[in-house]
Image (cartoon, rainbow, N blue to C red):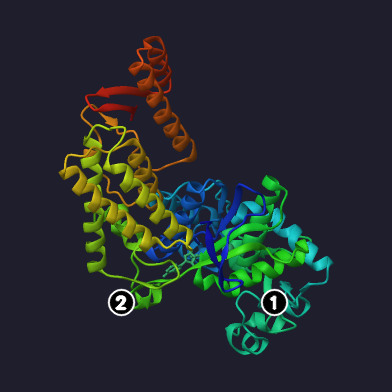
Amino acid sequence: MTLRLYNTMTRSVEPFTPLDAGRVSLYTCGPTVYNYAHIGNFRTFLFEDVLRRWLEASGYDVFHVMNLTDVDDKTIKGALAANASLGDYVVPFIDAFHEDRKYLHMLDADAYPRATEFIAPMVVLVQDLLAKGIAYRGDDGSVYFAIGKFPDYGRLSRLDTRELKTGAGGRVSADEYAKEDARDFVLWKAAREADEKVGAAWDAPFGRGRPGWHLECSAMALDLLAKRYGRDVLDIHAGGVDLVFPHHEDEIAQSCAHTGQPDFARVWMHGEFLTMSGTKMSKRFGNILTARDLRMDGVDAATLRLLFATTHYRQKLDFTDEALASAREGSRRLGEFASRVARQPGVEQSEFDRIALVLGDEFSAAMDDDLNTSQALAALFEATRAGNRALDAGEKPTAAFQSVWARMTGVLQVLPADPQALDDDGFRFVLESDGYPRERRLQEFWAVEMKNRRLEAKQSRNFAESDRIRALLAEHGWEVRDHRDGTAAVQRK
Ligand code: AMP
Ligand code: ZN
């Protein structure tokens, strides 16, 4: 089966084919760094991390960009209140975000562009839209996007014009009167005193000011993509469901008006909200829980990741203590089995080959079906049950099983941090699942392959060859260990 993903643009699950074979450009809207990100934000980020890990496990080379929104109303307000410059104000929140995402085992993106570092391409984009007559300068000195000149507007969110006019445009502010049409959105906000005070204003040919939030993502994605691939269309653009409108709708309008392409991304993916006691997490309701709160409480990343994986990313998930406790128990069960397996010497063939086959098939089918993580988890638990039974019956794990198990648990990152996974002298078992960067995966496949070859050489009494392979592996940090029932390659931690 091939990977199929739900595309918000078409409202359907479609086979996924990237623009260029074998590689995927992924842009995910990152945090606004005015505060600590809450676990609702992290539900979205972790869904994107699982997407990324599954794309990589499926053999794609992924180029992942996650922006950091460091200039917008919220960061400016925060800086003003703290009597700090914008630059100084956001730094600790950027650091905290990286700390939190590492705690939650999110893979490093290839780039974390900060909006304030991409003002130049934003200015170029606005200039182009002005030159094309799709943008105009309002009486207040701000630059607006003229929705009336972009017939495709509203395609992603499917809001009709009437709704746009009366409802979603929303807040009536002083700005509204400077626009030609109430639906138009701001590309560039004329500098105000507060912006100047915190250092959030830049010169531009169309007037001093600062970028609008939507403009930031368009400019950064286009700039980084073009540099990397010479492309102006993304393969996948993802975010939380609240970004469909207006954020992504406006990104499409600006980007497509600029590039002339029919779309800005081939697939638009949106994760549903995490709620607490049924209410959307927000400052206003006082029901905020941050990743650091969980870390202080000693919650293992695997517990939270398993909890999130129990519910499909397009369904709402309510966060409760009970759900967290049962996720902890689930993760413990998986971990207990993993360390039981790690303590066993590997063999060439056993019942575990069959378990590996079923796990590989079922897990992949579930993930290929628009990231059905709850089905994928079910496959892991089924393999755990069958594996425990097999171990009880005296069967020993095989390299094939270890490889599949490590790959699958690695995608979801649901194994607890378990010191027992280390064997006596500080070696980590060959196919442990944590992290799983591309190079490591290849290295591991290579090591398993080589240690098998060495065993064959040894069995056919070609000791020169077996010694040669042992030395080669050692050179790359692997040690071959012979056991009564087989051989294993282990890597120094
Ligand atoms: P922000 O920092 O507000 O720009 O949001 C960062 C990301 O978190 C965006 O993709 C939002 O859609 C997402 N997000 C915000 N609140 C929640 C929530 N309660 N549940 C899931 N995702 C959320
Ligand atoms: Zn964005």
Who's the residue at 20% across and 29% down the image? 424
Distance (Cα) linking label 1 and label 2: 35 Å
Q: Is residue 212 above or below residue 62?
A: below
- Quarter of the view holding residue 203: bottom right
Residue 202 appears left or right of 329? right
Q: Earlier in the sequence, mark 1 or mark 2?
A: 1
Who's the residue at 41% across and 63% down the image? 43
Q: Tag count in the figure?
A: 2
* Position of residue 73 measured from the top left corner of the image (x, y, whole percent): 55, 68
View quadrant of ligand 2? bottom right
Q: Which residue is mark 2?
A: 277
Q: Tell which residue pokes out farthest to the front in this image.
A: 460
- Closer to the camera, 174 or 197? 174
Who's the residue at 60% across and 63% down the image? 267
Q: Amino acid at mark 1?
A: Tyr
Which dot marks residue 185? none
10 Å crowding of disc 2: few (<14), some (14-19), many (20+)? few
Could you tell me which quadrant the C terminus lies in? top left
The answer to whether mark 2 is within 8 Å of ligand 1 is: no
* Position of residue 436 measured from the top left corner of the image (x, y, whole percent): 42, 42
Residue 269 appears left or right of 210? left
- Closer to the camera, 482 or 236? 482
Q: Amino acid at mark 2?
A: Ser
Q: Is residue 373 above or below residue 96?
A: below
Q: Which residue is mark 1?
A: 153
Q: Tell which residue pokes out farthest to the top in this image.
A: 464
Who's the residue at 33% across and 65% down the image? 289
